[in-house]
Image (cartoon, helix red, strand yellow):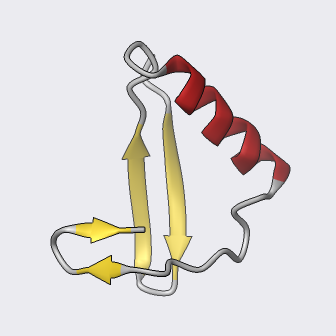
Amino acid sequence: MTKKAEIHTEKGVMTVEFFEKDAPNTVANFCKLAESGFYDGLRFHRVIPDFVIQ
């Protein structure tokens, strides 16, 4: 089963699909931080439409 996360913003919802097989430590770290509430209220500092959100 593929892990996914929903990121809720003022502009809508983004669904992120994880590649756990390719990056298991990164996926585990992201999930741990998300479950702890680390990302709640965090702002994106760089947005380039149709390219990248950081």
| Left/right of residue 43 with respect to residue 44 in the rendered view | right
**Residue shown at the point (74%, 46%) measured from the top left:** 33
Position of residue 34 measured from the top left corner of the image (x, y, whole percent): 70, 49
Q: Quadrant of the C terminus?
A: bottom left
Instruction: Tell me the quarter of the picture where residue 48 sits.
Output: bottom left
Outermost residue toward the left in this view = 50
**Residue shown at the point (59%, 80%) measured from the top left:** 43
| Left/right of residue 25 with respect to residue 47 in the rendered view | right
Vertical relation: 18 (above or below) 12? above
**Residue shown at the point (20%, 80%) measured from the top left:** 49
Position of residue 19 measured from the top left corner of the image (x, y, whole percent): 38, 25
Q: Quadrant of the N terminus?
A: top left
Vertical relation: 53 (above or below) 6? below
Position of residue 21 measured from the top left corner of the image (x, y, whole percent): 41, 13
| Left/right of residue 28 with respect to residue 13 in the rendered view | right
Instruction: Please give the count of numbered marks on the rendered protein.
Output: 0
Q: Nearer the viewer, residue 32 or 54?
A: 54
**Residue shown at the point (52%, 46%) measured from the top left:** 5
Outermost residue toward the bottom in this view = 10
Q: Nearer the viewer, residue 14 or 22?
A: 22
Position of residue 32 measured from the top left corner of the image (x, y, whole percent): 74, 37
